[in-house]
Image: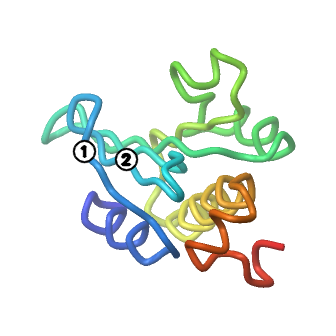
């Protein structure tokens, strides 16, 4: 997934906002809460995507090649995974993991905020 593909995908998810912070990382939020971080250390380095997961997904993904507990976040006990070496044929899976992260974070927002953002439909119940 390229930087443009990543940003276009995250922008298409409901009620998202984008900021560039932490050394040029593309940070995507829903309701002011981070659900995905795309980082690029340089122009030739492959991207790394960090996202929130369920406990089960965290345990499964941490053992797979190309995935690891997200630096800084997972060391603080948070269930965040970083995809740092994702093959081209895994793009659909990565998009689904990012979509799930958006869902997890959005579901944790207050009912009032979800309603204000238009997120209180059947997919977030």
Q: Quadrant of the N terminus?
A: bottom left
| Depicted 105 relative to depicted 121: above or below | above
Q: Secondary structure at mark 1?
A: strand
| Mark 1 touches mark 2? (CB < 8 Å) | yes
**Dot 1 surroundings within 10 Å: few (below 14), some, or many (20 or more)?**
few
| Depicted 53 relative to depicted 14: above or below | above
Which mark is on residue 32? Answer: none
Residue 68 lies left or right of residue 20; in this view the side is: right
CA distance for labels 1 and 2: 6 Å
Q: Earlier in the sequence, mark 1 or mark 2?
A: 1
| Depicted 69 relative to depicted 113: above or below | above
| In the foreground, 1 or 7 | 7
Give coordinates of residue 28: x percent, y percent.
42, 53
- From this viewpoint, which residue is outermost toward the top? 75
Q: Secondary structure at mark 2?
A: strand
Give coordinates of residue 37: x percent, y percent.
42, 44
Residue at x 43%, y 63% (from the top left corner): 88
| In the foreground, 80 or 33 | 33
Q: Quadrant of the C terminus?
A: bottom right
| In the foreground, 84 or 13 | 13
Residue at x 63%, y 55% (from the top left corner): 101
Q: Which residue is mark 1?
A: 20
Residue 94 lies left or right of residue 105; in this view the side is: left
Residue 62 picture quarter:
top right
Give coordinates of residue 43: x percent, y percent.
13, 41
Residue at x 23%, y 37% (from the top left corner): 45
Residue 58 lies left or right of residue 28; in this view the side is: right
Residue at x 36%, y 62% (from the top left corner): 6
**Dot 2 surroundings within 10 Å: few (below 14), some, or many (20 or more)?**
many
Q: Which residue is mark 2?
A: 27
Give coordinates of residue 60: x percent, y percent.
80, 41
- From this viewpoint, which residue is outermost toward the left? 43
């Amino acid at each position: 997934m390229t930087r443009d593909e990543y940003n276009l995908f995250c922008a298409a998810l409901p009620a998202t906002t984008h900021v560039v912070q932490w050394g040029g990382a593309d940070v995507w939020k829903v309701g002011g809460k981070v659900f995905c971080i795309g980082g690029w250390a340089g122009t030739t380095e492959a991207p790394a995507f960090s996202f929130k997961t369920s406990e089960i997904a965290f345990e499964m993904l941490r053992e797979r090649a190309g995935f690891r507990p997200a630096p800084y976040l997972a060391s603080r006990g948070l269930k965040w995974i970083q995809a740092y070496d994702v093959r081209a044929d895994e793009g659909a899976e990565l998009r689904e993991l990012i979509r799930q992260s958006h869902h997890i974070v959005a579901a944790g927002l207050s009912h009032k905020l979800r309603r204000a953002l238009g997120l209180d439909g059947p997919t977030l119940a």
